[in-house]
Image (cartoon, rainbow, N blue to C red):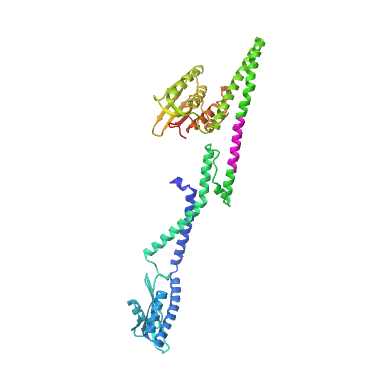
Amino acid sequence: MRRAMRSLFLKIFLAYWLTVVLVGVALVITYNLQPDLVMSRWRAMVGEATSLYGQTAAEELDRYGKVALDNYIQRLNASTNIRAALFDENGNLLAGKPSPTSRSLALHAARTGEPEFAVTSTTGWSARRASGPSGRSYVFVAEMPRGPFGGFRASFRAQALRWGVSLGVSGLICYLLTLYLTAPILRLRTAARQLAAGNLSARASVKTESRRDEIGELVGDFNRMADRIEKLIAAQKQLISDISHELRSPLARLTVALGLARQRSGSEAGSALDRIERESERLNEMIGQLLTLARLDSASVPPEKAEVDLSELLKEVVEDGSFEAQERDCTVRLESPAECPVTGTPELLRSAIENVLRNAIRYTAPQTEVDVAMSCSNGDRMAIVTVRDHGPGVPEGELPNLFEPFYRVANARERTSGGTGLGLAITDRAVRLHGGSVSARNATDGGLIVEIRIPLDGNA
């Protein structure tokens, strides 16, 4: 509920609708606070109409007789929905079909000589004396339904119906207006999330961009920004790929030259040549990882999908890692189910897990264990691999950046560790190609925990 109340759509909709409702309530309150004024205006208006109709009825009776009077009253009823009646001074009916209230009101008007009115919740009456050409006096009574006049209080059902229709119509108008204002923003948010998730081709609606208002300009600016980002990232990936390929040739020649230098040099140059060889090997490893990263970045799906027993693959990776762990005076402990079949590329999955495990072995403290565990859940259709070391961990603010190429944590994971800053980036790309995700968090008692989630069916 709290999240719904933070919705821009709901805020705008409720603001518009509440404004309309409050205006309606204010009008009703203003009307009800002035009942005497409204009633006096109604009496003045109805009194003038009754006087005119009564005078005409008296003239029709005196000049043309009762038949003409009956015809006039019928026409009046048909054209104005007024139920009229004409009485003599003694209250005797001359024409029309009056109600008991009309008769009693006519007698009262005949006695007082003043206009008389009566009002109920559904009907209003007006009685007034009138004189014909013969000089005789009459009393004309007009009975009017409540509909044409606003001076009476409506019944509860009528008021409920009016309020219901008013709220429905105003709500529909406010809903359409709010939808017009917020729908482009929601589509823009969707495009922004897709862009943040790595879909660089995501764009907001072109139809929205064609709007000639501030929202249309915002969408246009967003799409231009996304175009620029996509081009920059594509250029960066191409540059990395090109540089990696171009460095391979001079590196190969450097290796050949190094071998010739060892043959022609004396023992004094041995240490320097050994250093050159180590750096050449490190550079060759980095170039290989760059090429792998460039290949993963340019791929949209993992190549050569096949069914892979992730449990068996994990055992092989842990066995290889155990040899490296001996040099660090640490061990690797594995907990996994007997089997866990997934669909994917074995080489990529192996590389993803291996990079995380090597990273954990590199930074765990001596005489500690690197814990590797896997769960295979058919409920959420995910295989979850966790690798936990007992090292210095990573500052919380730097955890989201661990899987970016060449990113290094400043304090604990420096260049002296021997890493290239590409292993976790390759893991991230390989896992995402399988429709999974990788994340890192600090353990409560020290160390780093990396979690790899891979769909069992291999779908994104």
Query: Left or right of 366: which side holds 249?
Result: right
**Residue drawn at the location 44% of the way across and 81% of the way down:** 52
Asked if the stretch drawn in magenta spans residue 397, the answer is no
Relative to the observer, which residue lies in front, 317 or 250? Answer: 250
The reply to whether residue 234 is visible in this rendering is: yes
Relative to the observer, which residue lies in front, 189 or 409? Answer: 189
Magenta extent: 224-240
View extreme (bottom): residue: 134
Relative to the observer, which residue lies in front, 294 or 278? Answer: 294
Q: Position of residue 231 (x, y in %)?
A: 60, 37
Q: Position of residue 384 (x, y in %)?
A: 44, 29
From the viewer's perspective, is residue 64 above or below residue 341? below
Q: Quadrant of residue 93?
A: bottom left
From the viewer's perspective, is residue 317 above or below residue 34? above
View extreme (front): residue: 304
Q: Position of residue 238 (x, y in %)?
A: 60, 32
The reply to whether residue 421 is visible in this rendering is: no
Q: Position of residue 250 (x, y in %)?
A: 64, 22
Asked if the stretch drawn in magenta spans residue 239, the answer is yes
Relative to the observer, which residue lies in front, 328 or 239? Answer: 239
Q: Quadrant of residue 315?
A: top left
